[in-house]
Amino acid sequence: MATRAQMKRFIFFALLPAVAIYSVFVIVPIFWSAYYGFFDWKGIGTATYNGTANYIEVLRDPIFWLALKNNMIIVLASIGGQVPIALLLALILWKNTFFYKFVRSAVFMPMVLASVVIGIMWGYIYHPEIGLINYILQQIGLSSWIQDWLGDPSINMYSVSMPIIWANIGPYLIMFIAAIQNIPSEVEDAARIDGAVGAKRLYLVVIPMIWNMIKVAIVLCISGSLKAFDLIYVMTGGGPAQSTELLATYMYNNTFNIYRYGYGSAVSTLIIIISLILVLTSQVVMKRKD
């Protein structure tokens, strides 16, 4: 029988390759990017050290703060949309019958599609002239509601939030179903005897028992929303007039369109810092006593 020390050594050497690969391809580039944020560099040639000039310029740029505000809309929409919808569907579809498995597969299907395909599809749905939404509104007599969903700066951020929510419900649905199925039957039976059914069962049994999974889902929502790029880039490109600019598109445009690699590195470092602050804040807010 393996001793505790032998088990720890086995775990250490088993995890070592994965940790080494993760460090080389994720951790090291993060610090490398932060390092290049202190240089004026165009991607080729000599990098000129300019101290904190890039970081100061980023923080003084109103477009950066606009992109941050837009990203906060995406974060709130993701947390307020993906997590509750996924939890509701999990409560309905947690049984392993053929029909429920089919519906779960349908909900998960957007994750299989390429982001470019989803962006193009929703771009046609929102099209002001041939779009499905405006066509339906016209057919049911609500022509006054017809909008340029992606062109109107007052509503386009809410419009682009919808495909992001729709495309990312699937993983959280699977996570919540797995968590619900792992609730001990003894707890369910005791709650049923005590009269915890319906909404009481949800608030007194299900949510407390899967609380850690909900916290993980919110962390994933935050990190995924702050690196949102592909759907926005395909649907609007950050426009019109940068009204749908996000931090990732702001970084991309400055790095690869005007070849300011040092400035783009500074932006990426700030994105990581903002992400860590939001994640830590969410964990503190959601902390509860066992």
Image (cartoon, rainbow, N blue to C red):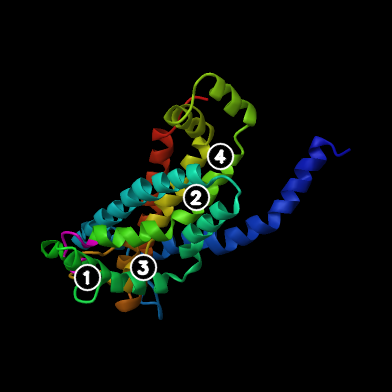
| Horizontal side, residue 225 vs residue 141: left or right | right
| Location of mark 1 (residue) | 135
Q: Which mark is residue 231?
A: 3
Instruction: Mark 4 or mark 1: name the one nearer the start of the chain.
Output: 1
| Horizontal side, residue 84 vs residue 94: left or right | left
Q: Which mark is residue 173?
A: 2
| Location of mark 4 (residue) | 180
| Horizontal side, residue 290 vs residue 242: left or right | right
- Give percent across and percent down for residue 129: 19, 76
Q: Which mark is residue 98?
A: none
Instruction: Mark 1 or mark 2: name the one nearer the start of the chain.
Output: 1
Query: CA gap, disc 4 to disc 3?
Result: 31 Å
- Give percent across and percent down for residue 257: 31, 78
Q: Is residue 40 shown to the viewer in this render?
A: no
Instruction: Mark 3 or mark 1: name the one nearer the start of the chain.
Output: 1
**Mark 1: secondary structure:** helix
Query: CA gap, disc 1 to disc 2?
Result: 31 Å
Query: CA gap, disc 4 to disc 1?
Result: 40 Å
Against 280, residue 73 (above or below) is below
Instruction: Mark 2 or mark 4: name the one nearer the start of the chain.
Output: 2
**Mark 2: secondary structure:** helix
**Mark 3: secondary structure:** helix
Q: Which region of the structure is painted magenta?
A: 149-156
Query: CA gap, disc 2 to disc 4?
Result: 11 Å
Q: Quadrant of the N terminus?
A: top right
Query: CA gap, disc 3 to disc 1?
Result: 23 Å
Q: Say if mark 2 contacts mark 4, CB within 8 Å.
A: no
Disc 3 vs disc 2: which is toward the camera? 2
- Give percent across and percent down for residue 34: 42, 60
- Tell me the amino acid under the disc marked 3: Leu
Q: Is residue 171 shown to the viewer in this render?
A: yes
- Residue drawn at (43%, 57%) of the image: 168
